[in-house]
Image (tube, rainbow, N blue to C red):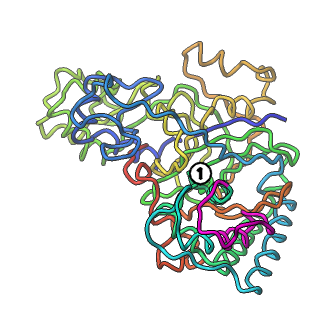
Amino acid sequence: MRLFGILSAQRGLCQRAAAVMLVMSGALAAASAVTPARAQGNWWDGPKTGSPSYTGTPGSDDTSERPVRKPEVLEDLRPDSTPWCSDVMLDAIGGAIQRYEQIVASGGWPLLPTGKMMRAGDEDQRVPVLRKRLRISGDMPAKGQYYDSETFDSELEAAVKRFQLRHGVRPTGRIEQSMFAVVNVTAQQRLEQLKLNYDRLKALGGCGSEERYVFVNVPAFQLEAVERREVQQRHRIIGGRPERQTPDVRATIKALNFFPFWRVPDSVATLDLIPRLQKEPEYLENEGIRVYNGYNGPELDRKAVDWFSPATANYKFKQDPGDKNALGLVRLDMSNEHGVYMHDTPMKKLFEQRSRPFSAGCVRVQDVFQLAEWLARYEAGWEQPGQVRAVLDGGQALDLNLTRPVPVYFAYLTAWAEPSTGRVEFRPDIYGRDGAATRSATGRDENDAPPAAAANALAP
């Protein structure tokens, strides 16, 4: 069995979101006019000025003096071959519920007083409280020395990192301001969260009985390709922003669209694209976007259009396939009432971030070509590896209709337990769907302070 990393998107809801990226103010808008988007980056898709991942100087596209930040090693993909959607996973979550019921019955864990950051080397009266908190939740050994010590030592630092990894937080080993809300979610609230997610998984019913299927867990930002009850591939994904949430979906992947067009939604054309073209008429040509006089009308000369004319209200826009296209080089066709889908993206760098709610509802898949190959492996002429790469190298648009369509599930699981180790995992409730289950004793949700990039990034 092979485990891979991944991400994706398409029309409807996602197309409307892609359009939002067409107009940006300030530095990124200026930079885009100078540097056309390539396969590794698209100006409308990335973090804005002010995001931690933006290291440039506002108003400048000179990268020569920007600090180079080493990408974080994420290690955020599940290691177990057991799928989320399985009786084995339900049993594992059930076992976690029993353990947390025992913790609650014993009085739970103490709350950590808020205050300044805590890190290795510090002397702090709150350290013994933190040690007890992590011992009860299993992040520190049940038996150990120096539990009354006020020194934040290397053992405690390692325990904090284990806790952070279990909660989908960057493993700094420090208790920073944003961590207090996570640490102070009570044992009772975590128990309720486990029960809630047990019910969510059980409600999916027969997905675990499918011969082959794709399962997307949005809060965990990952996707599983499952065959014969075993995970064959895992991919990182980008999900919807809190204001453009990726919905729960049950659908079927019926086709693979290579080199898709992107049709710019009317609302985006009116509110964003045309006002920009009044200032930058060369933008269409730079981004490979064509303009037409009506849906079925003739193509217009981009250089001859008067963008201040009332006639522009009737114009339609379509972006050519290729590396600049907002949908990337392949889209997974999965018709559903929400108009969401999975697809490639030109913004590969966003997969390097731990929290990835950047899209407008669709799902972008890392290494999506590997997923496409897995989906097509039972189609005539696609049995052997390499056919997807051959199509991409050929550069010609192709729609592959699957004779064996593959079910796909978009789900919202913020808590589970790994069957092989029993390790209980939690993820930030990015859409606030868990309600009081993750409302901490500080009065804040555990995801009240997400990475700034998640809040500031623009994406289709």
**Amino acid under disc 1:** Pro
Given residues 225 and 268, the one toward you in this image is: 225
Relative placement, left or right, of 95 versus 269 is right
Is-magenta flag for residue 133?
Answer: yes
Quarter of the image with the N terminus in it: top right
**Which residue lies at the image location 88% right of the left edge and 45% below the top edge?**
228
Image vertical order of residue 382 relative to residue 223, above or below: above
Please tell me whether mark 1 sits on a helix, a strand or a loop: loop
Which quadrant holds residue 131? bottom right
Is residue 8 something one can see in this rendering?
no
The image shows residue 198 at horizontal and vertical percentages of 75, 70
Quick check: 295 left or right of 334?
left
Q: Is residue 123 magenta?
A: no
Q: Nearer the viewer, residue 236 or 279?
A: 236
Q: Which span is picked out in magenta? A: 131-154
Residue 384 vertical position relative to residue 94 in the rendered view, above or below: above
**Residue that numbered label 1 is attached to:** 171
> Residue at image x 78%, y 66%?
144
**Residue shown at 71%/86% (left/top)?**
107
Give the image location of residue 62, x and y in percent. Answer: 28, 24
Q: Chief secondary structure of the magenta span? A: loop
- 313 vs 250, left or right, is left
